[in-house]
Image (cartoon, rainbow, N blue to C red):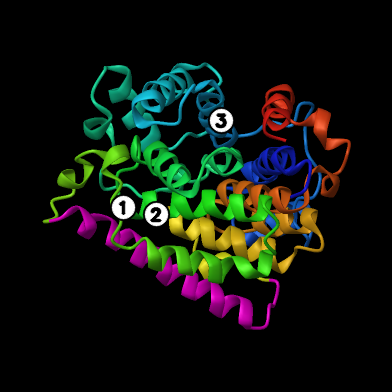
Amino acid sequence: MVPTAASGCLFGLAYGDALGGPTEFMSVPDIRARYGPGGPRELAGDPAPVTDDTQLTLAVGMALVSAPMPTAKVLEPLLRERFVQWAASPDNNRAPGMTCLRACGDLALGKPWIHATVIESKGCGANMRVAPVGLVADYDLDTLAGVAQLQAAMTHGHPTALAASELTAYAVRLLRDGAELPALPALLQARAHDQRTVYRDEWLGVLWQQAGVAHPADYLARGWDECRHVLDRLDLALTSADDGADACRLTGAGWIAEEALATALFCAIRHADDPVSALARAATTSGDSDSIACLTGAFLGAAFGMAVWPESWRDQIEYAGELAAMGEAWD
């Protein structure tokens, strides 16, 4: 384990978010016209602003830090409080996702989260914020899975949102513990296979009934199957020649959870020897560039720590103090 894996992960996530935020709704030709063929490689602004991706990552992280016990009964109100605070904040002006806004609005009204969640949504808002779950050393894999799925399910109720969130947190955990980046796709495939019929009722309660399926296992099986399908696409992309073009053509535009995971993994694995180039590649995409880049940064930072990021970026990024405090708590 790299001593600064947690800090590297959290700062890397924010750096990717800051680079990808301005390019999120741009075409790849327009991005290259503005930033050059290599895409954005320098933070802009002092502080360099992030989007709701980093804001919600901090919200999840602060809930985890303040939880005396990692149980659904303890964590649900803490996550609810942080999500509602984020939704009402004047700083929530970074083109936030409609699913998060809708669900948080109902959470603020006091609705049970099972009824507040948007059951049909598997947007990447479910897993672009889940990295902190993979950084808590005290979580065994069952707890990691439960926490990852709960934080996703409170806003995004689609089974693929839950499965992709668990896989994203699991990837961060594996990298933090020393796994090699090229090994991740196979490890994630194995996890998806093993968990296909597992329903964590102690964390999810009767959420499955909202989806109109006959059995709890049927609810999550669809999510795991969709994740395995996109991981197959990732394998094909990694075994094919890379022409350096838009990664979204290969693994998905990233607006949905499983595609954000796969496309970020593609960028991280392809450019593991040059993490800044990995962020630039992720930000130079036709899809959800900030979410793809923030996950790319989270994976690379968890694998290699703070040393791979430009030192000057640490004090330039927005929320630097919060990121540093959280990283130090888990490092």
Question: Is residue 193 shown left or right of residue 209?
Answer: right
Q: Among all residues in the image, which is located at the extreme bottom?
A: 240
Q: Secondary structure at mark 3?
A: helix
Question: Is residue 219 shown left or right of residue 66?
Answer: left
CB under 8 Å between discs 1 and 2: yes
Q: Residue at x 72, y 48 (%)?
A: 301
Q: Secondary structure at mark 1?
A: helix
How far across and how far down the image is residue 20, in percent?
65, 46
Which labelled disc corresponds to residue 308?
A: none
Circle 3 residue: 61
Q: CA distance from mark 1 to mark 3?
A: 22 Å
Circle 1 residue: 159
Density class for disc 3 (Cα within 10 Å; few <14, some 14-19, many ≥20) is many
Q: Is residue 157 above or below residue 66?
A: below
Q: Residue at x 41, y 36 (%)?
A: 151
- Magenta extent: 215-244
Circle 2 residue: 163
Density class for disc 1 (Cα within 10 Å; few <14, some 14-19, many ≥20) is many
Instruction: State the count of labels.
Output: 3
How far across and how far down the image is residue 17, in percent?
64, 42
Q: CA distance from mark 1 to mark 2?
A: 6 Å
